[in-house]
Amino acid sequence: MLLAGGYPVELPALSVGETFMKPTSMLYRNLLSMEAEELLRANPVDGAVLLGGCDKTLPALIMGALSANLPAIALPAGPMLRGNWAGRTLGSGSDAWKFWDELRAGNIDRQDWEAIEGGIARSAGTCMTMGTASTMAAVAEVLGLTLAGAASIPAADSGHQRLATATGRRIVEMVWQDLTPRQLCTPAAFDNAVTTVMALGGSTNAIVHLLAMAGRAGVPLRLERFDAIARRTPLLANLRPTGRYLMEDFHYAGGLPAFLTRIADLLDLDCRTVEDRTLGEAIAGARVINDEVILPREKALQAEGGLAVLSGNLAPDGAVIKHAAMEQRFLKHQGPAIVFSDYNDMAARIDDPALAVTADSVLVLRQAGPQGGPGMPEWGMLPIPKKLVAAGVRDMLRISDARMSGTSYGACVLHVAPESHVGGPLALVETGDRISLDVAARRLTLEVGEAELADRRARWTPPPAPYARGLGRLHLDSVTQANLGCDYDFLAGTAPTAEPEIH
């Protein structure tokens, strides 16, 4: 940046530590976005490099930058290197869940587990699966907010240092051009981002973040658009948790520019990028090096995108499922519900040998949405009861108003809207009710008559608010539902913040 004539100043912002913040890092995404916006507005800043890593930081910074609308370029932290244990390649998150179940089942011992923990994270960087961090880095790149190829460079690779240098040089040029995020983040660019997420088998969290980012850009993006794009987009990234490989493999297979050449006919290649060229120009000449990692169209993992949007009387405003990362026998399933009133209830009873559960049961978790969590925690991959794990069960249908980690997998219906805390139909489900899932038809149905549901609704009482003051109170008063992006209602849109007069 200095070499290009700029003067860099660090503006420290909230660190949204993904695994450390309670009750969930998602509670603080909007706060970070507000801080980023105000840092750019209140200080004599001409342009910004957005340094984002784990899941909420990059979307939060982009949301703030879209609202401030000063020249901005994103620099993703990059994924960590492949993990290793006993000659096996490990992927953070996905394999942690997998081997935790094997430990619970007695198939590995504590010594194995500690060796897995020691080998699963070999370097700095974000999760090396196609989790939320890598999904959002890809989103930033295809929206035109990063330099080409930035999304997949491993954090420990020297290419990342070169990327940082080039990013610093480019933001100075962008300031002179007055090239701002809203010029890049158009409706067509968001369609490109959704298409890319679907073809990558990206994180379900991307839907919530893209809805919020589009709201800040003044782009009318809706859940229905995600499903329409998913129907036409093949799943071509052979990456965990839906596939076999990891982000390091993806990068050396050609990275996102090469991947986008495989779906170029589904993209608007005229969209502009921070490099002041079109997306088509940015990916021109890129080539796939490994067809096992970045699959050709005729060998797609599945014919449609990795995520599906559901509707029905249990989710009038929508729900999300990552059907590419689940046992296919659950694509059409009906079973009796076992309802947990909240996370603590679930934790207390899930491994109780007396729990009347079978492999066909449907586990239902309430009080895990934007308000009920609060903050919509990543509780959606409910643990399988220990007695079923011991019997070899590795997937069950699970339904909640929660999110789940982008590294998670399984037949997990997420983001049920409206959430149970505000009286959505999820609040009315009782243990023993039959629930039907039909992914092909995109239907999620509570098999209970309308008269009975009306009676239950009349008897339902709102749960107490979890916060009475501070950010929690602001969150409860202002957060939108999952189908609208979980942003604060007063932050959406492109209305400018008035500048006070200086006397």
Image (spheres, rainbow, N blue to C red):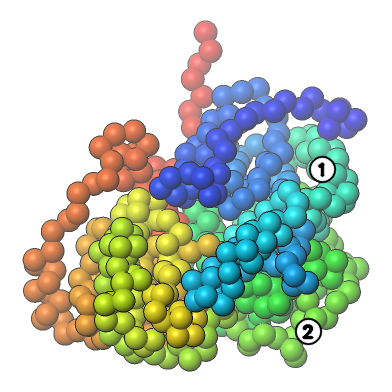
| Furthest-top residue in this view | 503
First in sequence, mark 2 or 1: give its number. 1
Q: At x 60% / y 84%, what residue is drawn? A: 304
334 lies left or right of 104: left
Q: At x 73% / y 67%, what residue is drawn? A: 85
Q: Which mark is residue 296?
A: 2
Q: At x 57% / y 24%, what residue is drawn? A: 42
Above-or-below relation of 249 to 51: below
Q: Which mark is residue 417?
A: none
The answer to whether residue 440 shows anywhere in this view is: no
Residue at disc 2, secondary structure: loop
Residue at disc 1, secondary structure: helix
Q: At x 74% / y 89%, what residue is drawn? A: 299
Above-or-below relation of 429 to 376: below
Above-or-below relation of 16 to 354: above
Residue 229: x and y, percent?
A: 57, 76
Residue 35: x and y, percent?
A: 53, 34
Reading the image, the residue beneath label 1 is 164
Q: Quadrant of residue 370?
A: bottom left
